[in-house]
Amino acid sequence: MKLTKIFKSAAIGLTASMLAVSAQAADVIKIGAVAPKTGALGGGAVVTQWPNVELWSKQVNAAGGLSVGGKKMMVEIIEYDDKTNPAEHIKAAQRLAEVDKVDFIVAPYGTGFNLAAAPIYAKYNYPHIAVSAISDKMPELTARYSNLFFTLGNTTSFSESVVDILKDMRAAGTIGNRVAMVNVADAFGIELAEAARPRLKEAGFDIVYDKSYPLGTPDLSPIIKGAKESNPDAFVAWSYPPDTFALTEQAIIQNLDVKMYYTAVATCFPAFVGKFGSKINGVFGAGGVNQDSPDIQAYFKAHKDITGKDADGWASANTYVSLQILGQAIEGAGTLDRQAVIDYIKANSFDTIMGPISFEDQISNRFWTVGQWQDGKFRGVKSSQMDGAAPVIAKDGWN
Amino acid sequence: MDILITGLLLGGTYALIAFGLNLQYGVARIMNLANGEMIVLGALAAFWIFIADAISPILTMLIVAPLSFFGNWLIYRFLLRPLVRRAKNQGQLEVDSILATFGMAFALVGVMVSIHGEYFTYSYLAEPFEILGETFALNRIVAFCFAVLIGAALWLWLYFTRAGMAVRAVSVSTEASGLVGINVPQLSAIAFALGGAVTTMGGTLISTFITLDASVGVVFTMKALIIIIMGGVGDIRGAIVAALILGLVETAVARLIDPGLTLAAAYAIFVLILLFRPQGLFGRKPS
């Protein structure tokens, strides 16, 4: 008897809360976010992706929500961990659309995941504003999926910018022709190394050391020793987070004395300067940000205040920008209708912390490609159409 | 010479990864798939305490070792003992313990992500150290010295003490050692707990030179498995020799042939040893 009573009251309570939810639902915009919290990309996503989802949604709600057709609507984020597993991602995306019935989605984290999940987000016609996805296949993909947008640039521009910096430094007499290049044996590293190789040769550089290493190699000192023996003027590594840290630690220990030192992903992370301090002054890395822009400075401060973490010097800002674009497009279209929002994104320019962003064939051509640590700040030095590039400095030892 | 020393240093790292699992699998008969997570837990402790208070990971290691011993003892006592009891044979225990520890690995990853989801990276003794004119990383040398100490202590304990002899007896046959009056359940619990403690200590040392994150444990579990299978399950000497071989081969291949082939070389050695000595280098033939 007692038990039935409990069940009854529980059932009543449940119905009541469900009613409350559905009453609320009308004033809430549900936004689904699937990205890794665990697995190989988890360590990167918790720096670059997740804090920005938190920051943006809190800021929007603190301001009273988004105004949609004259009505203020709060945003509610529904999060799933894809465990850095594409199959998990697809399952979670399906769940967002079918069970949670979210109105919009945050794009996945990682190139592979954005490409793998593009068909499913296209099926439900969610505006898919990809950030952490760098590929030369972008025009083909946007032609196939009319809901897909790219914002972070392509492989060609990333490798070209590195070659441009080498050319500039050679012209200035800082370095000679000898370049040591290594890459992680993974889609990202292989694609960038293959894009860079012919460009370096064309520009008249000697690639004196050219090796790849498997992801998760526990000791990279043989790589740095090999590179050092080849007596290079410049060292370029198309690397992933754990090896970006490990290569740099070995470069410091072995005193790899080059005037130009570049590691790719995660060079811009706060943990990088946290680990190495002033020793990495002059190190180049993928990405960049205009540290002098008041908008960016305000964003960095809000990021720290609200999420308790420092933003990175690259895709953190782009991720936030993608959410700003989504929010402005929902407000601009004045409806939660996804096709209307997609059309609005295609037709308009958006006022973001990185300046005005608009899309040409669903691709934004304003992004940073190379940044450099200069006196404790990761500054953008090469970009596609961005303002505020800092002048390049030569690496002067590891002190 | 450079290859030899770099290889030995890497081998020492591998030995640190494999010592603990060797005890857990060889003696307590628990195929602990959460071995890698124990390493990461040790690394997380070292990172966390270093960032907060700049306390040396070596000191952290001495603090976490007894904690980990106790924690692993509890895990064995309450999570794994029931499996040991109900298992009718070795095969069933292996299947059950693999499933249980697999689940435990997920739980541990979840806990660690909630503590610190980012990379555990800090600088400790990342300084050059010269041996015979070649430069090596001081933190790797320190870790190697501790690997030697831990390995030697384990070896002395296993081969020159009464308790150690009992442990070796259990690793040969649980039934027979029970018959001669060895308290098998208690000894298994101690072996499991000791294995866990050694693994965590390895984790704190490794974190000084490898950047880890909460979910990287499985990589270490795989390496540990390869090493103890190569060396012979339950034999500490085998684990040491196998770890050193692996370290030397990977370094030699990276320096002399191509860094891209290190993984392939490691697996080639693994396959060769299993082809010619299926029981592992120091393993006994099944009777």
Image (tube, coloured by chain):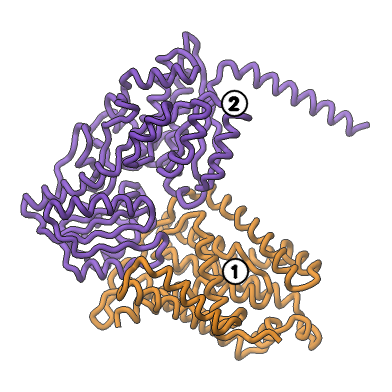
Chain colours: A purple, B orange
Looking at the rendered image, the quarter that the C terminus of chain B falls into is: bottom right
Mark count: 2
Of residues B106 and B77, the one drawn nearer to the viewer in this rendering = B106
As shown in the figure, which amino acid type bears the numbered disc 1?
A: Gly
The reply to whether callout 1 and callout 2 are in contact (CB within 8 Å) is no
In the displayed structure, A115 sits above or below B183; it is above
In the displayed structure, A77 sits above or below B155; it is above
Residue for badge 1: B196
Q: Residue at x 55, y 60 (%)?
A: B37
Which mark lies nearer to you, 1 or 2? 2
Residue for badge 2: A101
Q: Is residue A292 left or right of residue B154?
A: left
Of residues B146 and A93, the one drawn nearer to the viewer in this rendering = A93
In the displayed structure, A153 sits above or below B167; it is above
| Residue A397 visible in the picture | no
Q: Is residue A122 left or right of residue A21?
A: left
Q: Is residue A24 left or right of residue B55?
A: right
